Image (spheres, grey):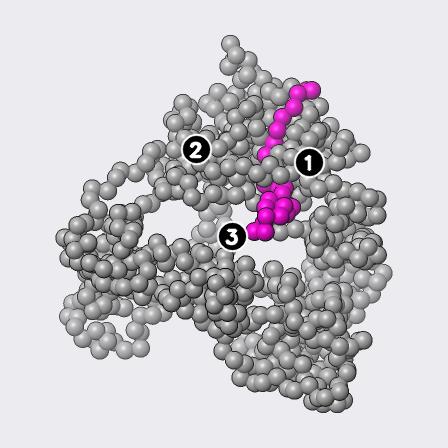
Amino acid sequence: MAFALAPPAQAQEEKPLSETCPNLTAEEIDGIENFKGEFAETAWYARAYCVSVEEAHRRIEIQLRGSIGPRTEPGPPPLPAAPDDSIGNLQGVLREKEPDTFAGLRIQHEPTYGVAVAFTRDAAATLAKYTSDPLFLPVERPGPTVIELRATQDRLVKDLSRLGISWFGAGSNEMTGTIRITLGQSADPIREAAARGEIDLPDYVVFEEPDPFPIPAPPVPPGDTRIKGFPQFAYRTDGMPRTLAGVPDVPARLTLRDGCLWLHPEGEEPKIAIWEKSQALDLTDPERVAVMNRFSGAKVFANSDVVLMGLQPGEEIPPAKANGADGCPGPYRVVRGITPREVWDSQRKQSALAERERALGSRVAAEADYAADMARLAELQAWRESRMTERGDVVAAIWIDEHQATAHVFHTDAVSLDALAPAALRPFVTGQVVPHGANALNAARDDIAAQLAALGLEAQITISEIEGYVGVRPEDVRAISDAAVAGRIHFPALVRLAMDNQSAIYWQDIPIRRDPEAVWYPLEAHPDFSAIRALVEQTPIMRPEPPRPGETDSRWVASKPSRAGSLQQTHFLVAYGQTLDRIQNLRRAGYDPIEALESMNGRATVEKRAVLATDIVIAEPVGIEMFHNGPDGFTSTVRWRIVETLSGAATPGSELRQRLASGERLNEAGERVYGQAMDEPVLLPGLPNSLEPGSRWVLHLNDALYRHSAYVQGGEGVARTEGRWFVSIPWMPPSRIDEDGIVRPVSLHPEPIALDELRERLAPIARALRIEEGERND
């Protein structure tokens, strides 16, 4: 069931309402065109469905009936007065009470407004058991029930993944009783698997197969041996959704080497191209090897300059399955759009001239401005080449915007931007400080690449100039760990491990999922909840506000929370183990957990992070249970021996246990597979940020947050209770103490800090909490 409104663009603007809605009176038309109400959606709806604003308001009120906004008071919302109290409530009641026949409902706007309620049989009689409201219209719809429809869709999605089928989307239509799956390949392998009995394929499942390419692939001339392999995705990608993130196009050189097509993109290592299915090898010209786009017929040629379409996040990863790769086994550079450089240059020039002509008012002025920019662009490119060659010790990268003829320099704090850019170009050059220059980054990349190549270990290696590290994404992380433990790999200091994030498991089929607010109810039972909330309501917090009319900069304004806001803030404070006494003692010492929690998004400090931890310790790992899955959603357990207590009640020499999302889980084949969570130490030995025996770490821990997280992820009674169990607080991951006494978080943020400085800054907080502990014991 979806709440439907017509957007402004859909409204029938081309003709007057008197023509598009002849059923409306002049007064009703005036009410729509000169709408003065609070919500513009009312007028949009009235215009789209040719009803008065009063009728539109009535319908919208019906659709919103029973909607739950942010809670303002503790406890569950009141129960509905009747099954048909709202559309949503009736839907829930029918799912629960009539699972064998309920087939879904939808809002019907035309020709008669109402809610169509479908059943597989006996629609009128079944609906009459729950409502006599004429708003609800019984509909007979043979086929699967809602529950069967959803279960089939979920099962098919798993089956398709198991079979290695490429699909882009899956959705069900309750009113037609069908499931529609959009594929990136032919459905024949699915039907064949169903014929073999490997999957169940009901007749209400519809596959949308990709249309054939409009242009056939050119035949390969007999005996042509110029190409050994033409690696391609094993499935179609032209139907995949792409994100809206803007990424620059990449100039490159396409070359033919040893029977393979190689790409040499600017700023990247040369790699073999792996092409989309929509690209075809064209060997019809005996003099030139080409690749043809099977949609447009456009070609790019080997040994020519090209421009690659920028890759969205995640698209840079080559597919696990590829066709035609035997003769050209990689490493691969994904191609998701490619254009001859001369075509791209021409298109860019015409676009730039049109843009300038609009801004400057004449073609002559536009061409003069463009010529000046292109002359400066040539100077910037020459300057970049010389600076990267001569000053790679302090310059990590120089990005040039060829459209605007400007440059951006990533340089270390050992040099100023003025010292790098010549005076004539300085107005067109911006910069920012980064940790390392290109020489150090390139040396680390070349070092680890050579070591991995010598051992035959596959990994994607990238450089992050902004963050100042070399990322290694291994194909087999355990193999690299084993090699490191055996002393065959030594990781340069700037190398970091890159892996897909493995988060804690959020179990779906548990009782508390029936009420989305249920995760908060135990917190609201805390004896200090009301008193803490009263403090929250009286505490102004700095929050961003939009710019005033005529201004462009947002503002930070101190304001007290709404009732809904104070309820949410109090939830989190109690989840973090805050009590009334703790908050008051910390406030007397000059620290406010209420303000600290609100500051975690961009305004955190050492002290603000510390007040949200129940225990801050220096500890050594003494045991790792890497396969320690549990109903609390976590995967592994680390036992720590406390060396020093910086804050909290933990005692030196004792042990504590921390739950992590990292660790081993069983895959569909029943095999243990290691996964790594963000902001956690690596549990496999020998790798960067591994929990090595004898290493010492600063841990910001919280046992109350563990209990709350376990309840959210797994429900009632799943938190471990034999002793104290902890998780790290967000925003402050475990931090290894290096040989120079520097505390270095496993993530890139926050910044490293000297251990002595950390001790000094935490001491007042520890004293305040000892006072609280003493008062509690008294």
Q: Which residue is mark 2?
A: 716
Quarter placement of the N terminus = bottom left
The part of the image, by quadrant, that contains residue 45 is bottom left
Rendered view: 434 above or below 331:
above
Closer to the camera: disc 1 or disc 2? 2
Question: In the image, is 682 to the left or to the right of 184?
Answer: right
* Mark 1 residue type: Ser
Which contiguous range is marked in magenta? 652-674
Whole-percent x, y for residue 260 in the image: 76, 75
* Mark 2 residue type: Glu
Of residues 262 and 185, which is closer to you in this image? 185
Q: Are marks 3 and 1 in contact (CB under 8 Å)?
A: no
Q: CA distance from mark 2 to mark 3?
A: 46 Å
- Secondary structure under tag 1 reads strand
- Secondary structure under tag 3 reads loop
On residue 211, the disc is: none
Within-10-Å neighbours for mark 2: few <14, some 14–19, many 20+: some
Residue 383 visible in the displayed image: no
Q: Which residue is mark 3?
A: 553
Question: In the image, is 139 to the left or to the right of 680?
Answer: left
Q: CA distance from mark 1 to mark 2?
A: 32 Å
Whole-percent x, y for residue 530 in the image: 38, 26
The part of the image, by quadrant, that contains residue 174 is bottom left
* Mark 3 residue type: Asp
The part of the image, by quadrant, that contains residue 638 is top right
Rendered view: 361 above or below 25:
below
Answer whether residue 97 is magenta in the image: no
Q: How many marks?
A: 3
Q: Which residue is mark 1?
A: 735
Q: CA distance from mark 3 to mark 1?
A: 36 Å
Question: In the image, is 631 to the left or to the right of 47?
Answer: right
